[in-house]
Image (cartoon, rainbow, N blue to C red):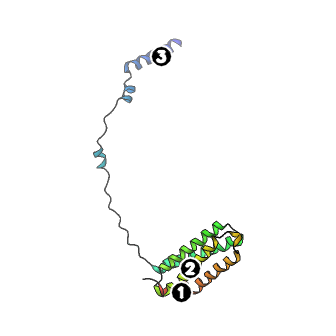
């Protein structure tokens, strides 16, 4: 048995030696790079997709900003009732102011004056919020914001403003 194992190892080593290191050498031989232009020809040229023009719908825009005003107002009410931080209250009031500005841009000049007055009143509230919390009455600020919201909902809801939107 030992003879057969030894003979097998001898035949195996002779077979390995006769082949040499050819497969190992192939691994480390530098090959030429393939031509880059040949690979670019295989890429298909796609036709660009044409998208339709975005249609400006002032009613849709106004509804969006009016809805966002309502969301920011509810956030302000919940923050004020919970005694939230001044920084958070100022942030929400600033977002409400931004929505009023965007709504004002969508209304014609005849109705714009009422919305400008609401915007000025809200700016006054923002100025009050800049004073330290000890020196202002929170219920007064909340009352002013509530009055601005009531005037907005009574005079500038979507049904009342439909005819006064920019075309």
Mark 1 is surrounded, within 10 Å at the Cα level, by few (under 14), some (14 to 19) or many (20 or more) other residues, namely few
Q: Which residue is mark 3?
A: 9
Q: Is residue 3 left or right of residue 133?
A: left
- Give the mark toward the camera: 1 or 3: 1
- As drawn, the label of residue 159 is 1
Residue occupying image coordinates x 58% and y 83%: 152
Q: Position of residue 18 (x, y in %)?
A: 37, 18
Q: CA distance from mark 2 to mark 3?
A: 99 Å
Q: Is residue 45 left or right of residue 2?
A: left
Mark 3 is surrounded, within 10 Å at the Cα level, by few (under 14), some (14 to 19) or many (20 or more) other residues, namely few
On screen, residue 56 above or below 23? below
Q: CA distance from mark 1 to mark 3?
A: 97 Å
Q: Which residue is mark 2?
A: 120
Front position in the image: 100 or 136: 136
- Give the mark toward the camera: 2 or 3: 2
Badge 3 element: helix
Residue occupying image coordinates x 62% and y 83%: 150
**Earlier-in-chain disc, 1 versus 3:** 3
Disc 1 + disc 3, Cβ < 8 Å: no
Residue occupying image coordinates x 52% and y 79%: 63
Q: Which image quadrant is residue 10 in?
A: top left
Disc 2 + disc 3, Cβ < 8 Å: no
């Amino acid at each position: 048995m030992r003879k057969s194992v030894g003979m097998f190892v001898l035949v195996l080593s002779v077979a390995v030696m006769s082949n040499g290191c050819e497969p190992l050498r192939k691994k480390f031989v530098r090959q030429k790079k393939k031509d880059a232009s040949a690979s670019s020809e295989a890429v298909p040229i796609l036709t660009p997709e044409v998208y339709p023009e975005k249609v400006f719908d002032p009613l849709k825009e106004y509804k969006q900003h009016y809805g966002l005003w309502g969301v920011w107002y509810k956030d302000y009410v919940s923050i004020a009732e919970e005694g939230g931080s001044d920084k958070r209250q100022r942030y929400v009031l600033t977002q409400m102011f931004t929505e009023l500005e965007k709504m004002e841009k969508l209304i014609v000049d005849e109705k714009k004056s009422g919305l400008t007055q609401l915007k000025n009143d809200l700016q006054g509230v923002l100025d009050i919020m800049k004073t330290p919390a000890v020196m202002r009455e929170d219920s007064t600020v909340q009352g002013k914001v509530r009055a601005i919201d009531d005037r907005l909902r009574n005079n500038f809801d979507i049904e009342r403003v439909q005819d006064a939107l920019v075309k």
